[in-house]
Image: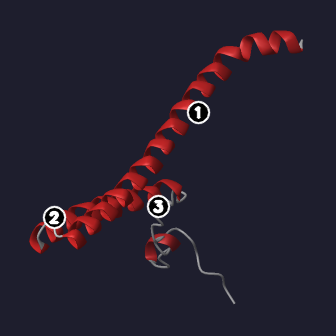
Amino acid sequence: MFLVDDLLLSPIKGIFWVFQEIYDAARQEQAGEGEALTAALSELYLRLETGQITETEFDAREKELLDRLDLLEARDETASAPAKKSAKPRKKASVGKAKNKGLKKPRR
């Protein structure tokens, strides 16, 4: 019985494995992109210190790199945060004529 189950579920397990490998590769690429941006920032600071670029060139390039790094970090935060359902406020039941329509008041 277990052999039959394994044979029937093997295509599903194979597809799951492929998707897991793709996910792992994408995560590694994102981590590498963050490291590359940090290295580019370090190189940029070094070039400014040695006088190879001007302050205006440095500011423009630094802003671009920091924006990309912030975007990457925001994407990582949204990917790791669990999806939240938007809570819709419930309507309160109206206690009026429409609700009590057709009901007789109890006699006392």
91 vs 11, nearest the viewer? 11
Say what amino acid the circle numbered 1 marks.
Gln
Quadrant of the image containing the N terminus: top right
Q: Secondary structure at mark 1?
A: helix
Q: Residues within 10 Å of mark 3 (few under 14, many from 20)?
A: few
Indicate left or right for 62 with 91 as reference: left
Q: Which residue is mark 3?
A: 77
The mark that comes first in sequence, 3 or 1, is: 1
On residue 107, which mark appears?
none
Q: Which residue is mark 1?
A: 20
The mark that comes first in sequence, 3 or 2, is: 2
The answer to whether 63 is drawn above or below residue 11 in the figure is below
Residue 75 pos. (x, y %): 40, 56
- Residue at 57%, 71% (x, y): give it: 103
Q: Secondary structure at mark 3?
A: helix
Indicate left or right for 2 with 51 as reference: right
Marks 2 and 1, how far apart at CA:
45 Å
Q: Which residue is mark 2?
A: 52
Marks 3 and 2, how far apart at CA:
36 Å
Q: Quadrant of residue 15?
A: top right
Quadrant of the image containing the C terminus: bottom right
